Image: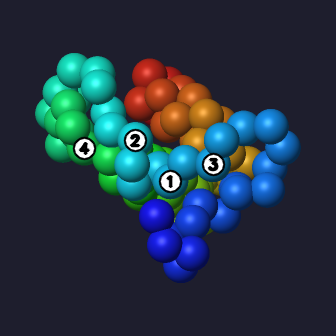
Amino acid sequence: MSASNLPKNLKNGPCTAQSSDCVVWDGPEIPCIALCPGDTITKAVYILALRVCALEAQLDISNYDIQCISTVGTPKNFQEMISFLITKVCNP
């Protein structure tokens, strides 16, 4: 391993430094995130991080405009918004 490819955690205590590019996923194939046995842990973490970011964006209630049905106020989070919408549908 050349000096430029050394892991950033090289000086983190008693552990042996290992690049996540050198560690492979040995679990089963996970089709929903396109992860296959033999993929690097770097790829696995990257795929999961992208999914988490996308999910956070979808759950951000500032992305939704419910003013046309709200006369009481604005929900503070996604769970409150879903509860509000369910209540509106069930009790119009």
Q: Are marks 3 and 1 in contact (CB under 8 Å)?
A: yes
Q: Earlier in the sequence, mark 4 or mark 3?
A: 3
Residue highlighted by disc 4:
39
Residue highlighted by disc 1:
19
Q: Are marks 4 and 3 in contact (CB under 8 Å)?
A: no
- In the rendered image, residue 41, in percent from the top left (x then y), is placed at 40, 44
The amino acid on which the numbered mark 4 sits, given as a three-letter code, is Asp
Q: Earlier in the sequence, mark 2 or mark 4?
A: 2
Residue highlighted by disc 2:
23
Q: Are marks 2 and 1 in contact (CB under 8 Å)?
A: yes
The amino acid on which the numbered mark 1 sits, given as a three-letter code, is Ser
Residue 11 found in image quarter: bottom right
Mark pair 3, 2: CA separation:
11 Å
| 6 on left or right of 10 | left
Q: What is the secondary structure assignment of the residue under circle 2?
A: loop
Q: What is the secondary structure assignment of the residue under circle 3?
A: loop
Which residue is outermost to the bottom?
4
Mark pair 4, 3: CA separation:
19 Å
The amino acid on which the numbered mark 2 sits, given as a three-letter code, is Val
